[in-house]
Image: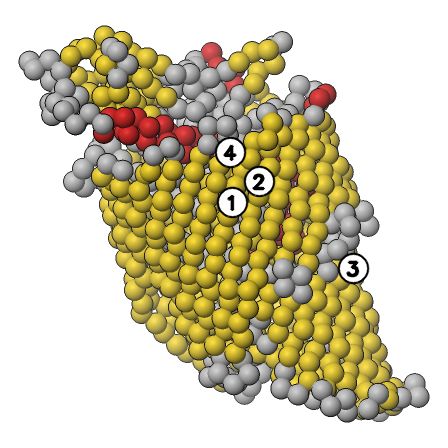
Amino acid sequence: MIFNLSGKSFPILFALVSLLCSSTLYGQDSKKAETGRLSGRIVDGRNSPVPYATITLLKTDSTVVNGDLTKEDGNFSIAPTGTGTFLLRINILGFKQRFIKGLEITTQSPEKKLGNIKIAAEEHTLNEVHVTAEKSLMEMHVDKKVFNVEKNITTTGGSAADVLQNVPSLTVDPDGNVSLRGKDNVTILIDGKPATLLGGDNASALQSLPASSISNVEVITNPSSKYDAQGMTGIVNIITKKDKKTGLNGSVSIGAGTNDKYNGSLNLNLKNDKWNVFLNSSFRQNRSYRRETNDGIFYDGTFSYESYEDNLREFGGWFNTLGAEYTFDQKNSLMLTQNINKMQWGGRGTSSLQTFDSGHVQQVQRRSFDQMGSPLSSSTALNYKHKFSKPKQELTADATFAKTWVDRTQNFTTNYYDGSESLTAGPILQTAPGEGSNTSWNLQADFTTPLFTKTDHFDAGWKSQLYGFESHNTPLRSEPGSPTVVDASLLNSFDYSQDIHAAYINYSDQRAKWSYQAGLRMEYASYKGTTMSVNGAEYTNEFLNLFPSAYLSYQLPQKQNVYLSYTRRTDRPHFHQMMPYVDISNLQDTSAGNPNLVPEFIHNIELNYAKQFVQGHSFIASAYYQYTENLIAHYKRFNNGGSYTQPQNLAAGITYGLELIGKAQILPIWDATLNFNFFQTEIKGANVDPSLQNSGFSWFGKINTNLRLPQGFSLQLNGNYEAPEIEAQGTEKAVYFVDAALKKSFLKNKASLVLNVSDIFNTRKYTRRYDLDNYYQLTYKDRETRIANIIFSYRFGKSDVGKRRAQGRGENNVKDRNSTGDDDGDQGGF
C-alpha cells in the first residue's frame, strides 16, 4: 500500500520498484490464464513477519508470470497464476534472495498454500568483521522524509534546533523558530504526540533538548486525515531513541564544547520475550552570546533611533524517559511511559538605546537585565494495542496526561541620560517574578481493517485534546523619591483553555499500478482566554470544520513513481501569540500578543515525482501550492519613539514552489544528499493596513556529504544557503554557513570519538529590513554559532545480534524499517 508507508524505511522503496519491474513484464503477457492462486507468509529467523517483500512467480524458463508485495503481517497472495510448474522468487533489501522450485498448480488443485516461508538475512564476512546494510542519512517516502540524526555527526553534542536546521525542507531562525519550505507555524510532535513536554515555548525548548536524545526526525508536508489538522505547512515529528534488541543493552556519551557547553546521555534497555524496559536520560548545558542591533530611520531625516543589546543566554535541561512495554500474547501489548524534564532558559546582559533629532543625540537609555525561566515537565502515557484474528485488523488506544510548571524572573535596572550624558532619571528598578503552568490531556483510539479487497485499508478514529494554561506575575517598579508601585507595563496575568475533539475516516486501496487514498476529518475547537492586563477582558471563540484529504499515485516504468495529493489544514493561534502581555526588554522594539486572533485555514496541493537508480542514486521533485486564509503575520508600527509588533490576521497568503531532493552515491565510500527549494510568496494584508501587500521569490539549498576513510575515520560536511526572503513588511537578507565533523570508531565499533565545528566561517548572521509608512528599521542578530564540540560515545551490553544471525536475521532488517527504532549498527559510515 503506497500511502501506508508511515514508519517504514528504504526497503519499502526497494520492494516497490522491484515489484514494478515484475508487474511491467507481467503486463506484457496478455494471454495469461485467469485461474490459480498461490499464497503464503514470509517470516524471518524469529518467525516475525517481513512486510514489503517482493514476491515474483516465474515459469521454468524464468518468464515472469505474476507477483505481489507482502503486507504488514507478511502475507502475500498471487492470482491468477495459470496452471503448470513454477518457480517462486523472494526479494527484500537486507535479506538473501530465496527461490522455491517445483510449485505445481493444476486445474484439479488450482489453489496452493505455502504457509510460513523463512528467509535469511544477507550478511558478508570479511576478516571476521560483519558488514550489514545500514540506514542512510535521509530516507525518502511518498508522504514524508525521515532524517536519521545519528548519521549526522555535525550536530553531535548540539540541540534539537541544530538537528532540525540540517533536515531537508526545514530552516531555523536565530531564536529557534522552525520553518518548513519557508513558512513558519509548523506543528512539532514528539513520538507522534503533541510536544506538551516542551513547556509551551517550543523555540526555547528546542534549544534545550539535547540532540543525543533524538533518533530521527520525520517531515510530513501533506498529512492525511489520520493526523491532526493543526499546522500551517505540515508536521515535524521528533522520534526519541528506543532500543528493540533482546538482552541488556545501553549506551553512554559525554561531551564538551567551547565556552562552557556540556552534554551527556545514558540509554539503557532490558528486553525479553514479554518485557521491554527502557531508560533514557540526557542533559545539556549551553551558554552563548547573543547580540542584537536595531536602527530606525525616518525617511525625512528628522528622527532616528538605535539600540544595541549584548546578552549572555543560557539553555539547558535534564530530560528523562522511563518506560515498560509488556506483550501479553501475539495479539495484545501494553506500554507505560513516564517523562520528567527539568529545563532552564534565559539570559542576562546590558542594552543601550539612543534617540536622535536631526542627527543630534536627544536621549540615552542604558539598562541591565536578567531573565530566567525554569520549567518542570511531567508526562504519563499509556498505550494499548490489540491485533484481531483477521489479518491487518488492529485497534490502538492511547491516553496521555502532561503538565508543566514554570517559575520565571525578570529584573531591569534603567538609567536615562540627556545628550550631554547627564543623568535625567534613574535608577529605575523593575522586577516581575511570576509563575504559570500548562496542562494537557490527549485521548485517542484508532481502528484499521481491510474491507473489500486484499489490498485495501479502512481507518477510523477519534481524538480529544484538552489544554489549559495560566500565567501570573507580581511586577513592581521603584525609583528614587517615589514609592514602589505595581508596574502595569510588565503585568502578565492570563488564563487560557482550548478543547479540540476530532473524528476521522480514511480509505485506501491499489489497483494494478494505481493507488489512491481519501479521508475526511472533522474537528471541533473552542478556546477561552481571560486577562487581567486589560481589565479582565474575556476572549472566546469556537469552530467546527471539515478537513478533507485525497491522494493518488501511479507507478511508472524503470523505478519511477508519481504522487498527487490535496489536504485542507488549519493553524490555531498559540497562547503565546494571544497573550496581551507587552515585552519591554527593548523599549525601542516592543511586542505583545493579540487575544483577538482567529485560526488560519490552508489548502495544500502537492505533486511529487520519485526516481530510484540502480547505482544507489535517488531523486524526488515536489511542486506545491498553498493558499492560506486569515494569514497570521507580525505587524510592526511606530509607537512612543520605537517600534511595536503584534500578530494580526491578514486576508490571505499564497506560496507556491518547487523542491528538489537527491542523493548521489558518488563512490562506494562517498555519498552526497542535496536539497533545493524555490518558492514564490504573496502576502495580502490590506484588510489591516494598505501597506501590507508584498510578494517575492526566494530559495534555499542544503548539501550534506559523507566520506568513509580508512582506519575507522569518517568525515562529514554540511552546507546551507538561504536567499533573501520577503516578509509582510520587509525582507530578510541572505545567510550561509558550513558545518564539519570528523569521527573515529574503535573498540570493534562499540566506541566513537567525534570532533565537530558548526558555522566554520562564522557567517550565520541574520539581518532584516522593515519598510514602514514613514521610516524603515534594520535589525541585525548575531548569536554564537561557531562552536566546537568533542563527544565520546560507547555502546555496551549483551544483545541478541549473534542469535539473530544464527537464525537468519540481520541487525537491520525489520528494525531498520521502523522509523521509531534506534540505529544500533555503526559500521564505519553514516
Q: Which mark is residue 673?
A: 2
Q: Is residue 484 left or right of residue 610?
A: right
Q: Earlier in the sequence, mark 3 or mark 2?
A: 3
Q: Earlier in the sequence, mark 4 or mark 3?
A: 3
Q: Are marks 3 and 2 in contact (CB under 8 Å)?
A: no
Among the 4 quarters of the image, the one containing residue 201: bottom right
Calculate the distance from the C-alpha at mark 4 to the C-alpha at mark 3.
41 Å
How many other residues sit within 10 Å of disc 3, few (<14), some (14-19) or many (≥20)?
some
Name which residue lies at 27% across and 29% down: 23
Residue type at numbered disc 3? Tyr
Of the two numbered discs 2 and 1 on the same chain, state the one appearing first in sequence: 1
Mark 3 → mark 2, Cα distance in angstroms: 32 Å
The one nearer the camera, 65 or 36, is 65
Which residue is label 1 attached to?
661
* Three-letter code, disc 4: His
Q: Quadrant of residue 454?
A: top left
Q: Does dot 4 land on a helix, a strand or a loop? A: loop
Query: Label 1 near label 2: C-beta < 8 Å?
Result: yes
507 w.r.t. 85: above or below: below
Q: Residue at x 58, y 71 (%)?
A: 727
N-terminal label among 1 and 3: 3
Give how far apart the Cα atoms at labels 2 and 1 are.
Answer: 7 Å
